[in-house]
Structures are given as structure tokens and as C-alpha cells.
Image (cartoon, grey):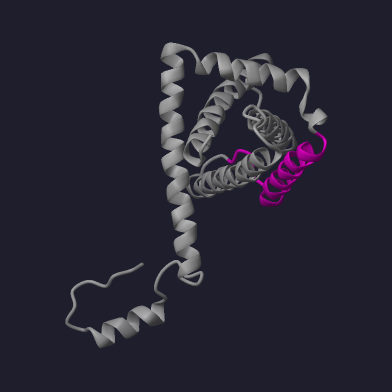
Amino acid sequence: MNLLDFIFRLGVVFAIYGFLWGVFDLGIRMISSGRERSISEVYLFRTIKYFFLVDVTFLFCLESITSDMVVLNQVVLAGIILLTYFIGKLKKNQNKSILFRFAGQGLPQKENNFNLKSEIAIIILSLMAFSLFWFYPSYASNPISFWFHESIINIEQTPIFGFIFKLIGLFFLFNLIFKMLGAITFVLNGGKLGATKNDRNQNDDDNHFDDYTEIS
């Protein structure tokens, strides 16, 4: 399995897993009559969600076993993809929290279920669990992870739903490539996201006849 195929497959896996977890989460909310969750409950469920995601991801890494080196390469790549995925989720939750605080000014306040330290902690714990599976693969074998694994395969092979999730996997592939290219550009630029204020002022002085200033 080449690099792009592997990333695409993981995109499909992530999408279907998110769908299955969403159904499970909806069922829990219906049982609890839509009760607002405390921040501890939010991060307990998120920890469980991330744990089984890395568990299922590891099981998919073991599917195409040709040699230990191939599996190791896939595990390392999957770990990088998981890290990128988790950081994307963290940023999304953080942006929602900022929007919540901004839009909620002057309105009755609801609990803001976001904690940066907890987000970072569950990401680290999830990646540690993923690394642990490489040394103790038996820990990745449990009825829940097997159920997710088989359910994902069955949905993936369904004509209509499978096609939809494959489209999502394709978007995931493109999105991940753009993120990696952005990270490479960031490194090549020496860690600069764009021109600083002083740089822009200097460019304005040197090119005061220009109508536009190019920002990297």
C-alpha cells in the first residue's frame, strides 16, 4: 500500500469512525434526556473516543502485513496523521470556545466545555496508547475495537454509504497534504507565518509606489 492510498484509507476510517461514534453519542444523549454535560464528562467521553480511534487505526495498520518494516512505517505515518488530526480537533474546539465567549457576551452564560490542558493531555495519552500497541499489540485486541473495525469495513463496502465516505476520505487526503505543505513552508520560512510589521513598513518605504504588499 503506497503512501497516498494509506492516507486515503485512514481518511475513510476516520470518517466512518466519527459517524459511528456520533450515533453512539446521540444515543447516550437521548438516554440522559439531553442533559448538559459537565466538563469532566466531556473529556471522559473524548478520551474514550480518542482511545478507540487510535486502537482501530492500529488494527488497520496491521491489515497489510508484508514485513515488520512496512508495518513500522505505516504505524509511524499513522501516528503523524493522528497527531495532525488531533491538533486540528484541538484548534476547532478552541475556536468554538473563543466564538462562544465572543457571541455570549451579554447573554445568559452556559458552561464553556473547553480546557486547553485537558485537550493536550488526552492527545498525549492517546498517542502514548498508540505507541504502546506497537510493543504490546495484544492490548489493541478487544471486543469493542473489533466491533468498530468490522463495522467500518462493512460500511466501507456498502455501495452508497461507502462511496460517500470515500469522498470524505479523498477530501481528508487533500486536506492533510495541504497541512503538510503548510508545515514544510513554515519550516522553510524559518518559522515565520508572514511578514512582520517592521518588515511591511520597510517594504512600504522601499517600494512606496507599489499598490499592494505581498505577504507570504
Which corner quadrant holds the C terminus? bottom left
- Residue 8 lies, in percent from the top left, at 48, 34
State whether residue 92 is above or below residue 209.
above
Residue that lies at the very extreme toward the bottom in this rendered image: 206
Q: Is residue 215 left or right of residue 106?
A: left
- Residue 58 lies, in percent from the top left, at 68, 33
- Residue 176 lies, in percent from the top left, at 48, 45
State whether residue 50 is above or below residue 194.
above
* Number of marks in picture: 0
Rendered image quadrant of residue 196? bottom left
The chief SS type of the magenta part is helix
Which residue is rendered at x = 33% and y = 85% of the image?
202
In the rendered structure, does residue 130 fall within the stretch colored magenta? yes
Rendered image quadrant of residue 66? top right
Residue bounds of the magenta highlight: 109-136
85, 149: nearer the viewer: 149
The answer to whether residue 216 is seen in the rendering is yes
In the rendered structure, does residue 193 fall within the stretch colored magenta? no
The answer to whether residue 28 is seen in the rendering is no
State whether residue 108 is above or below residue 29.
below
Which residue is rendered at x = 51% and y = 69% of the image?
191
Q: Is residue 194 left or right of residue 113?
A: left
Which residue is rendered at x = 46% and y = 18% of the image?
162
State whether residue 186 is above or below residue 148.
below
Q: Is residue 211 left or right of residue 9?
A: left
- Residue 87 lies, in percent from the top left, at 59, 48
